[in-house]
Image (cartoon, helix red, strand yellow):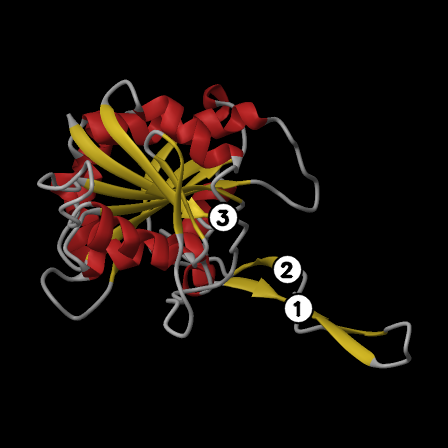
């Protein structure tokens, strides 16, 4: 069976990662290495100035006090390379980061801890996928069953040997509409789009009369252009976006073309 490492930025107890583990455990050996607490929007941070701690909470489930990229690195550089580890001598076949609570579309991939954890794995030559469920935080539907729309799609990808379709120095960024599987109209190979946010910074006064600020603009839609990940999700389609990490190997268009036939075969809606 494949060895799959799961990580995220929502924390080890988040429903998305645990539903993904539940779904994939019938077809793979699944190991979770995830942050102890939520680390959303932390980008590609590595912990270099303090200690990193790893705790096995239960069999094959580890919490790490670091950031999402730290979690990937702890799995790759410690759990599977330490002679004292039960995984020593084995290899990681695939790293999957998610299922994230909320979309990672457009330029959000540069802020996302979810994508960073997948990117760290890709830097070490391991096929990697970031996967997000596109919950609308303005009108939240707390039905955790919608995570199965994403987890079952990822299971289909894994069963179809998606790891062999991911080119070196690239990753797949998958975004799944927040709805039931029956409502999803298909899957589309996409490019990274552009989301629009307000530039407002909320200034407030604390109880001592000092100013403080909340950063976090209001989402105002996305730029309309063909093949964008934003448009796919708007159309109730699963977005599968190959993301190049350096100027190496195949072009972005070649990456997209190589995935289109594969995706049509496994998800023909």
Nearer mark to the viewer, of 3 and 2 = 3
Are the residues flagged by discs 3 and 2 in contact, CB closer than 8 Å? no
Residue 105 in the image: state x and y as whole percent. Answer: 45, 53
Picture residue at 39% right of the left edge, 67% below the top: 47
Sequence order check, earlier mark of 3 and 2: 3
Nearer mark to the viewer, of 3 and 1 = 3
Q: Which mark is residue 36?
A: 3
The image quarter in which residue 253 lies? bottom left
Residue 146 in the image: state x and y as whole percent. Answer: 52, 27
What separation in Å lies between label 3 and label 2 (alpha carbons)? Answer: 32 Å
**Which quadrant would the N terminus be assigned to in this image?**
top left
Q: Is residue 201 visible?
A: no
Give the structural element (helix, strand or loop) at label 1. loop
Q: Which mark is residue 220?
A: 2
Circle 2 residues within 10 Å: few <14, some 14–19, many ≥20: few
Are the residues flagged by discs 2 and 1 in contact, CB closer than 8 Å? yes
Sequence order check, earlier mark of 2 and 1: 1
**Which quadrant would the C terminus be assigned to in this image?**
top left
Say which of 70 and 10 sits in front. Answer: 70
What separation in Å lies between label 2 and label 1 (alpha carbons)? Answer: 7 Å
Picture residue at 46% right of the left edge, 22% below the top: 181
Give the structural element (helix, strand or loop) at label 2. strand
Circle 3 residues within 10 Å: few <14, some 14–19, many ≥20: many
Circle 1 residues within 10 Å: few <14, some 14–19, many ≥20: few
Sequence order check, earlier mark of 3 and 1: 3
Question: Circle 1 is placed at which residue position?
Answer: 198
Say which of 17 and 149 sits in front. Answer: 17
Q: Is residue 266 left or right of residue 103?
A: left
What separation in Å lies between label 3 and label 1 (alpha carbons)? Answer: 31 Å
Q: Is residue 188 visible?
A: yes
Picture residue at 11% right of the left edge, 60% below the top: 250
Picture residue at 12% right of the left edge, 67% below the top: 248
């Amino acid at each position: 069976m494949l060895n799959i490492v799961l990580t995220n930025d929502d924390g080890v107890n988040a429903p998305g990662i645990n539903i993904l583990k539940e779904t994939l455990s019938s077809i793979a050996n699944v190991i979770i290495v995830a942050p102890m607490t939520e680390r959303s929007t932390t980008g590609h941070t590595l912990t270099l100035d303090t200690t990193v701690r790893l705790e096995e909470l239960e069999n094959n489930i580890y919490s790490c006090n670091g950031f999402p990229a730290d979690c990937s690195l702890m799995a790759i550089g410690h759990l599977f390379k330490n002679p004292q580890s039960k995984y020593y001598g084995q290899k990681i076949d695939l790293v999957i980061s998610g299922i994230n609570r909320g979309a990672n579309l457009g330029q959000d991939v540069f802020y996302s801890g979810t994508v960073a954890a997948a990117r760290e794995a890709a830097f070490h030559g391991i096929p990697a996928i970031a996967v997000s469920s596109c919950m609308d935080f303005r009108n939240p539907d707390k039905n955790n069953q919608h995570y199965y729309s994403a987890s079952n799609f990822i299971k289909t990808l894994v069963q179809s040997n998606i790891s062999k379709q991911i080119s070196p120095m690239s990753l797949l960024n998958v975004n799944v509409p927040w709805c039931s599987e029956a409502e999803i109209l298909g899957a589309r190979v996409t490019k990274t789009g552009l989301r629009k946010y307000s530039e407002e910074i909320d200034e407030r006064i604390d109880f001592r009369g000092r100013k403080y600020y909340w950063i976090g603009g209001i989402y105002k839609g996305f730029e309309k252009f063909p093949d964008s990940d934003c448009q796919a999700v708007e159309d109730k389609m699963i977005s599968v976006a190959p993301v190049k990490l350096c100027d190496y190997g195949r072009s972005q268009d070649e990456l997209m073309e190589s995935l289109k036939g594969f995706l049509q075969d496994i998800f023909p809606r």
